[in-house]
Image (spheres, rainbow, N blue to C red):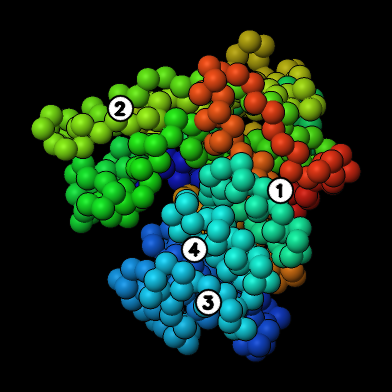
């Protein structure tokens, strides 16, 4: 999206000099179709099609089945698959539950779910129960019951689930993660993150154009406005926490030697969406009478067992530049994404910020050094390439993914916990221990490698 252009420009700074071997492809050992990972896709709207495009770059997979209730999206997906020389996939979508017939296929090993939020957990549960390696778009769950459903189904079936949080693979985030692992910042103390993104042009449209025109939503809208905006009508909570909390959770080893303990949240009044409708549709437009429950700025503070604090901000209804607001602070220094700045005790000038570019280049992650050029154009500055790469490689080996069902539950739990805290005047809410005590002995995933 246009608001991410500044980040995409920054990735070019780190990409200089990165090159790939001529003719490089994935799956060098895949000599026949029978050895390729057979993938089914549930949901091939704009997000699902982005994943499809990245999957079709690979030679170690086959897209064997797709499902969507929109015939237009099915046509687009089938055309993309066949244009790449692949066999036409089996098609499902006659009703809301036809995806279950896709899950019954022997021709499907793994499934990518890219549907509206309210379908995420139920589809992921059905996919795990069908024994298919599960890739689930964010957020993974809407309620605490759904968070537990993901964990319980994973444990009951033994089937793996990966939450497809692409921001964990952003180039600057992975460089900072590399710094964290090399103790550049010292003992970690405090983090800030969130989702600060003017989504008014996403939550409303004219029913014909996905983004940027009109003030319709729900039945009169298309794409995300058809379903996403309703969450702003009904909920006063951080309804989209994982882009911010995912990277911070990895840096602080959540569910692997550390865990979230408590959360408190506050909400401002909500005027942004109403003002947008009035400005672009007029005071007499029916949607000008809609009462949007979501506060314009939701602020949550999380405490961990290891003594760190994390401030998470949700800010999507007001005019503002895009930022996930990252700050990583340790005993020896800190990095902030806004301003692209860093300060390290004894390494930078006392009491002054330094531009972070040289540091990010020095600690550029091995994955980006290896695949950076190939990732260009993959979506969201290249990070979509890496999240799908990790999913495929984990599914091929049938091993636990970098971001698993316990992570999906803990990160998504911010939504119902923030809602409860706001409803109770900011009262602290206890995080469930989704690992049932195993966080004490679970080892962190090895993020600093160049495979996936």
Where in the figure is residue 445, as x and y percent of width and height?
A: 78, 49
What secondary structure is found at the residue carrying circle 2?
helix
Residue at image coords 67%, 48%:
148
Where in the figure is residue 291, as x and y percent of width and height?
A: 29, 30
For the residue pair 145 and 65, the one nearer the viewer reads as 145
Q: Residues within 10 Å of mark 1 (few under 14, many from 20)?
A: many
For the residue pair 56 and 236, the one nearer the viewer reads as 236
What secondary structure is found at the residue carrying circle 4?
helix
Q: Give the label, 2 or 4, closer to the camera.
A: 2
Which residue, as the protein is rendered here, is positioned at the far top? 351
First reached walking from the N terminus: tag 1 or tag 4: 4
Residue at image coords 48%, 31%:
237
Q: For marks 2 and 4, give the CA distance.
A: 31 Å
Using the rendered image of the protein, determine whether residue 373 is visible from the camera's viewpoint. Answer: no
Name the residue carrying label 1: 406
Where in the figure is residue 450, as x and y percent of width and height?
A: 72, 57
Residue at image coords 44%, 54%:
116
First reached walking from the N terminus: tag 2 or tag 4: 4
First reached walking from the N terminus: tag 1 or tag 2: 2
Does 98 sit left or right of 212 as displayed? Answer: right
Which quarter shows the C terminus?
bottom right
What secondary structure is found at the residue carrying circle 3?
helix
Which mark, residue 102?
3
What secondary structure is found at the residue carrying circle 1?
helix
Mark 2 touching mark 4, by CB under 8 A? no
Q: For marks 3 and 4, give the CA distance.
A: 18 Å
Residue at image coords 71%, 48%:
406
Which mark, residue 272?
2
Does 274 sit left or right of 13 as displayed? Answer: left
Which mark, residue 51?
4
Mark 1 touching mark 2, by CB under 8 A? no
């Amino acid at each position: 999206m246009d608001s991410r252009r500044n980040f995409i420009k920054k990735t070019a700074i780190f990409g200089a000099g990165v090159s790939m071997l001529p003719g490089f492809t994935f799956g060098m050992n895949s000599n026949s179709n029978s050895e390729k990972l057979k993938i089914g896709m549930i949901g091939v709207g704009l997000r699902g099609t982005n994943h499809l495009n990245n999957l079709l770059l690979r030679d170690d997979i086959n897209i064997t089945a797709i499902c969507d209730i929109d015939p237009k999206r099915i046509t687009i997906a089938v055309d993309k698959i066949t244009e790449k020389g692949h066999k036409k996939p089996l098609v499902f979508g006659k009703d809301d539950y036809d995806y279950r017939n896709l899950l019954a296929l022997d021709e499907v090993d793994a499934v990518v779910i890219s549907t509206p939020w309210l379908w995420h957990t139920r589809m992921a549960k059905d996919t795990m129960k069908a024994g298919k390696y599960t890739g689930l778009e964010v957020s993974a769950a809407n309620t605490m019951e759904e968070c537990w459903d993901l964990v319980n189904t994973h444990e009951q079936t033994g089937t793996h689930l990966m939450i497809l949080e692409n921001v964990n693979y952003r180039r600057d985030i992975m460089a900072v993660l590399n710094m964290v692992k090399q103790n550049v910042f010292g003992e970690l103390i405090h983090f800030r993150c969130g989702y600060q993104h003017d989504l008014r042009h996403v939550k409303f449209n004219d029913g014909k154009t996905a983004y940027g025109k009109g003030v319709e939503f729900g039945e009169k809208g298309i794409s995300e406005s058809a379903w996403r905006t309703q969450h702003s009508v009904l909920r006063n909570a951080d309804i989209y926490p994982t882009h911010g909390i995912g990277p911070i959770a990895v840096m602080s080893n959540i569910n692997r030697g550390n865990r979230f303990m408590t959360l408190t949240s506050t909400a401002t009044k909500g005027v942004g969406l109403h003002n947008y409708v009035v400005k672009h549709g007029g005071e007499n437009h029916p949607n000008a009478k809609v009462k949007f429950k979501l506060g314009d700025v939701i602020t949550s503070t999380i405490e961990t067992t290891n003594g760190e604090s994390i401030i998470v901000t949700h800010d999507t209804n007001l005019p503002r530049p895009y930022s996930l607001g990252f700050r990583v602070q340790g005993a020896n220094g800190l990095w902030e994404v806004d301003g692209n700045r860093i300060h390290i005790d004894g390494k930078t000038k006392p009491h002054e910020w330094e531009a972070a570019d040289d540091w990010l280049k020095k600690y550029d992650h091995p994955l980006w050094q290896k695949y950076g050029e190939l990732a260009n154009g993959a979506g969201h500055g290249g990070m979509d390439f890496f999240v799908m790469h990790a999913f495929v490689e984990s599914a091929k080996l049938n091993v636990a993914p970098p971001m698993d069902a316990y992570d999906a539950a803990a990160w998504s739990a911010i939504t119902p916990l923030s809602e409860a805290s706001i409803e109770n005047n900011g009262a602290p809410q206890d995080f469930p221990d989704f690992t049932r005590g195993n966080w004490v002995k679970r080892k962190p995933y090895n993020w600093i490698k160049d495979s996936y």
